[in-house]
Amino acid sequence: MIEIEGLTKRFGAVAAVAGIDLKVGKGEVLGFLGPNGAGKSTTMKMVTGFLTPTTGRVTVCGHDIETDTLAAQKTIGYLPEGAPAYGEMTPRQFLTFIARVRGYGGATVKERVDAAVAKTDLDPVLDQPIDTLSKGFKRRVGLAQAILHDPPVLIMDEPTDGLDPNQKHSVRELIRAMAKEKAIIVSTHLLEEVEAICTRAVIIDRGRVVADGTPAQLLARSRHHNAVTLTVAAKDAAGIITKLRTIPAIATVEQTPAGDGIVQLTAFPKSGALLIEEIGRMAADDEWDVKELYAEPGRLDEVFRAITTHDAARAREGRA
Amino acid sequence: MNQVWTIFRREFATYFATPLAYVFIVIFLFAMGAFTFYIGNFYANGVADLTVFFGYHPWLYLFLVPAIAMRLWAEERRTGTIELLLTLPIPLWATVVGKFLAAWAFIGIALLLTFPIWLTVNFLGSPDNGVIFASYIGSFLMAGGYLAIGAAISAMTSNQVIAFVVSVVVCFLFTVSGAPLVLDFFRDWAPLFLLNTVASFSFLTHFSAITAGVIDLRDVIYFFSLIALFLCVNIVVIDLKRVTR
């Protein structure tokens, strides 16, 4: 439903977005990741028609955003960065305004506003000026505005930024509930959010897509993917390490002190091999005193750092 | 048209949701009174007309209208609501016109609230009410001209102070373009027709023609085309900003 082809955006000599191609279909929740300044927000601003691309094309539900702007914008719900809203209005007035702009009239205005308010739990603050609301409520006003017309395409720039853990949870539930019917792009730098709600993760760095896959595929690129961590007493550690090294599928074993006479051992597999069963068996046979034993799914922050800092380092070398 | 009305309503309500409207109206009325009665010596003139009153309008508008216009777009840019506004399915012209009309209507209300002075001259003598009516129309049109200039300049920046100062300067040039201050700059080298063209841009020339009691179609067309021109500039500026941020 969203098609992005060869999208670039230059501000003077700086290429904020340097050629992005993406297709997002119905039922997909695409997590848009990247370091600050990578071009996430700029890309979203072009997809929603706020900025004009330098080159490239964006089509939303079959409508070109540049030539058929209004038709495309009708199908989009957009939560801009920082959830801007008119501070002197109350959420009720603001959402009523949005509903009218969206072309609703008469009784359907109230229906739409009520539905959006119910979904975002805005009831307690409905008649207070938005300027006086907490960050969490402001963000939800922005969300309510974005989902008011039940759009087939939802684009949200950091929807859970500034929310407390409970609010984050309810926003994620809301996104998950809508996911089946819509194409959703969510930008975030909270990696746990990607694992929680996204069906697909795209990492961009310096204006380019550097990784694109399901969260599981990205996790598989982590060094920790399928690694096994054991927590044991420090005095037993040396013996256990020696035994572990006899397993051919293990590449290395690292140890980190975990407090009072306890160490954590992490065995990294060669090329993603499964280790947990073999280590488990060994631990049972040799009667190790193991306090914890678990396989790691992989760490997204590690993948993220590996992909995005490599590039930065390479750029530095290139310049030197 | 519906969308112009939606934008208009929101924008217009905003003035009264904040102290802005009340502060502006009070200062507007106070300044009008002060100029007319103290500096213009309204009573001492002993003439039952409002020439003195309307004579100060261009100079008051010069500062008060840019004060209203400066926030029109600069504020949206600063708070980020412009991103919301421009990604909603509204044609840009409707947004520009809606915002302009709301501000113009607001100034119109402030202008209407000067009616006690109209009552006063009628109480003191028998003025030509036709002339006064024409002058009110002229004053309102002129305010629209200042406002359109200010709105277009406001769209260029996110800084309201810059918007205000630049608007005052540009409005000043339009006000006095018929005066020697501006014309002397052109007189030595410009051909006569250019000189006349520059002079014909003057708000003062057109406004004083109307306050003389004749609503000449040419003066009305002048103000309306000026407003239309600057609303177009406003649209173009916003569209250009989509390219450069």
Image (cartoon, coloured by chain):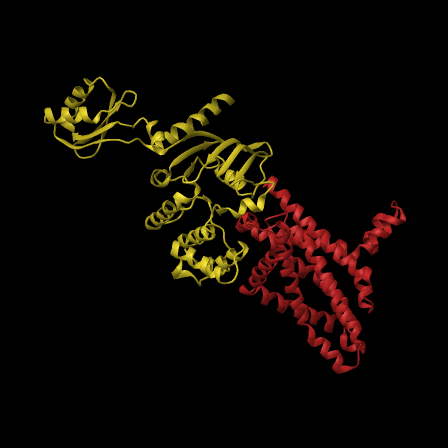
**What is the quadrant of residue B242 in the picture?**
top right
The colour assigned to chain B within the rendered structure: red
Classify residue B45 as left or right of residue B12. right
The colour assigned to chain A within the rendered structure: yellow
Q: Position of residue A44 (x, y in %)?
A: 50, 40
**What is the quadrant of residue A57 in the picture?**
top right
Q: Position of residue A176 (x, y in %)?
A: 36, 45
Q: Position of residue A276 (x, y in %)?
A: 21, 27
A286 or A258: nearer the viewer: A286
The reply to whether residue A57 is visible in this rendering is yes
A309 or A42: nearer the viewer: A42
- Please say if A275 is above or below A58: above
Please, which residue is most extreme toward the right here? B192
The reply to whether residue B160 is visible in this rendering is no
Question: Which residue lies at the image location 77% right of the left edge and 67% below the top edge?
Answer: B55
Question: Which residue lies at the image location 24% right of the left edge and 19% below the top edge?
Answer: A249
- Please say if B232 is above or below A113: above
Question: Which residue lies at the image location 53% right of the left edge and 53% below the top edge?
Answer: A102
B141 or A20: nearer the viewer: A20
Q: Position of residue A10 (x, y in %)?
A: 58, 34
- Please say if B41 is above or below A243: below
How many discs mark residues in the rendered view? 0
Classify residue A73 as left or right of residue A236. right
Classify residue B196 as left or right of residue B112. right
